[in-house]
Amino acid sequence: LSVYSGLEQEVIRTPHGRVSGVLELYGADNSLDGAPYFNPSRTLSTSLTGRWEWVLWRAFERSVTQRILVTGGHLLQEGFDDTMVYSAEYAQEWAISRRFVLDAGIQWARPVYDETRERRTLLHASLNWRLPR
């Protein structure tokens, strides 16, 4: 069983950008022992993210927007000491047309699994295709 809740609050909005904060809460209770993936018996986490995005260029339906996210949080895992987790992300969104948007970025994170802190660098890219009505 897992439960997630998130709340985003926009703090500043201008014609070319916005700043917002995101509060997230997550809890899980697992009964499967010895799973081949990270599956703690009980975990609870909270995090706060600062999100800043702004438009670099816009021409009619096309635009380039970039965003920076900085996250800090707290993780409680049953049987281990509580710990801080954090990450940072930079990404760009290229609106090619009303229907096609390319999103790409990089994220640096320091997650913790069973009290072992890891270093993680993720590259991500997606092409979103909005279907016509």
Image (cartoon, grey):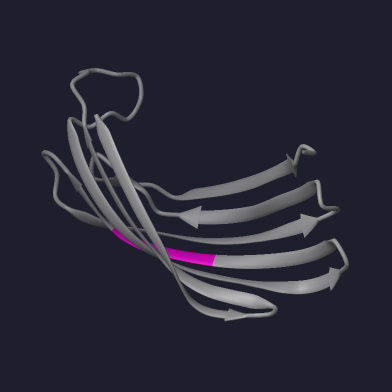
Residue 24 percent across, percent down from the top left: 34, 55
Task: Give the residue furthest to the left.
Answer: 79
Above or below: residue 56 compared with residue 94: below
Q: As rendered, which of 47 and 96 lies closer to the eye?
A: 96
**Residue 107 picture quarter:** bottom right
Indicate the quadrant containing the N terminus: top left, top right, bottom left or bottom right: top left
- Residue segment shown in magenta: 69-73
Residue found 32% across the figure and 30% down from its top: 38
Above or below: residue 95 compared with residue 36: below
Along the horizontal axis of the image, is 65 left or right of 40?
right
Q: Would you say the magenta stretch is mainly helix, strand or loop?
A: strand
**Residue 125 picture quarter:** top right
Residue found 32% across the figure and 49% down from its top: 5
Residue 66 percent across, percent down from the top left: 68, 66
**Magenta region includes residue 71:** yes
Task: Give the residue furthest to the right.
Answer: 59
Residue found 78% across the figure and 57% down from its top: 94
Q: As rendered, which of 41 and 65 lies closer to the eye?
A: 65
Along the horizontal axis of the image, is 111 left or right of 126?
left
- Image mark count: 0
Residue found 75% across the figure and 41% down from its top: 130
**Magenta region includes residue 55:** no
Indicate the quadrant containing the C terminus: top left, top right, bottom left or bottom right: top right
Residue 59 percent across, percent down from the top left: 88, 69
Residue 115 percent across, percent down from the top left: 23, 45
Along the horizontal axis of the image, is 28 left or right of 60?
left
